Amino acid sequence: MGKVTVVKLGGSVVTRKDKPFTVDERTLKRLCEEIAASGKRRLVVIHGGGSFGHQIVHDLRLLPPSRSADRIGLAKVVKVMDDLSSHVVNAMIDSGLPGVLFPTFAVAVSRGARVKDLFMKSALMALEMGLVPVMRGDLCCDEATGYAVVSGDVVVEALARRAAVEKVIMCIDRDGLESGGKVLPCVRMRDRSYEGALWEGEAVDVTGGMRHKLEALRPLAKKGTGLLLINGRRAGRLLAALRGGRTVGTELRW
Ligand code: IPE
């Protein structure tokens, strides 16, 4: 089985952070068209929560997990993420990409917000059939805390532990990690030398922001998986990254 490329569509890119529960349809469409134009088909697309998932978890005060949390609230998180996933899959299909959804809530169990079990057989068979599995950051049943909010980045890492992933392209709303106003073309993960280049986003973020994303991806860097942070809001960068060409962004190496 050939190696898989993972594209993470950050919530800050596919939703509008200034408007809760609003998809950035234009950006989403363009990103799907770039994926389609790349010709790559051994792909998994993972999307984040943006102003859908983060907003509702925050509004309903569902974190830290509580045994007495309102069950309707928990169901609403999954429903809201279903709505966002539905936009993503629609945009993919409209661009000629056969996206099929594997909601993380249904295929994964976490322990302390880390994915412990991930049912992969159907997604891997779908890949073999030429379909493009779509996964996401999501609410998850959690062995330690009852439920947890699992980020798309944790899902990326869990997937790469179970499938042969050659490259992960993370689309965020910045050009990459920066120092002194300049994009760092490459950052070493081994000693966490990126700490000084992190930022606090202005949007609601219940999963821990950029620091959490990089921490989740560290094991992949150690394994030698190609990791690239790019700006999904700039036209052409995802296409260039998928084609393996040079583009503005930050490569994460061990
Ligand atoms: C968050 O996933 C999922 C929920 C809040 C339900 P991510 O943490 O991967 O989302 P983004 O990409 O940062 O928006």
Image (cartoon, rainbow, N blue to C red):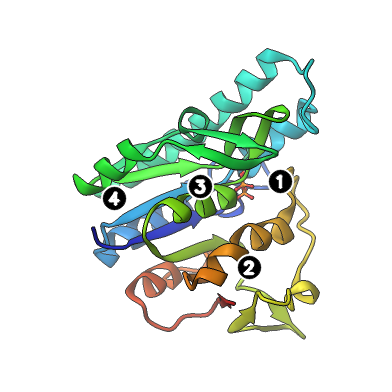
Between residue 219 and residue 54, name the one nearer to us.
219
Q: Quadrant of residue 79?
A: top right
- Residue 95, disc: 4
Q: CB at mark 1 closer than 8 A to ligand 1?
A: yes
Three-letter amino acid code of the residue under disc 3: His
Image quarter where ligand 1 lies: top right
Question: Dot 4: within a 10 Å radius of its alpha carbon, few (fewer than 14), some, or many (20 or more) residues?
Answer: some
Q: Nearer the viewer, mark 1 or mark 4?
A: 1
Q: How many angstroms separate mark 2 from mark 4 (CA)? A: 25 Å
Asked if labels 1 and 3 touch by Cβ distance under 8 angstroms, the answer is: no
Residue labelled with disc 3: 47
Q: Quadrant of residue 124?
A: top left
Nearer-N-terminus badge (3/1): 3
> Observer-nearest residue: 182 or 170?
170
Queried on whether the Cβ of the residue with tag 3 lies below 8 angstroms from ligand 1, the answer reads yes
Q: Name the mark nearer the viewer: 3 or 1.
A: 1
Nearer-N-terminus badge (3/2): 3
Q: From what the image shows, is residue 64 above or below residue 189?
A: above
First reached walking from the N terminus: tag 1 or tag 4: 4
Which amino acid does the dot numbered 1 rest on?
Thr
- Sequence order check, earlier mark of 2 and 4: 4
Task: Answer few, some or many: residues within 10 Å of disc 2's Cα (few below 14, many 20 plus, some between 14 and 19).
Answer: some
Q: From this viewpoint, is residue 98 visible?
A: no
Mark 1 neighbour class, 10 Å CA radius: few under 14, some 14 to 19, many 20 or more: many
CA gap between label 2 and label 1 equals 18 Å
Kind of residue at disc 4: Ser
Q: Is residue 65 at least partly visible in the picture?
A: yes
Residue where numbered disc 1 is placed: 207
Q: Which mark is residue 174?
A: 2
Query: Sequence order check: which comes first, mark 4 or mark 3?
Result: 3
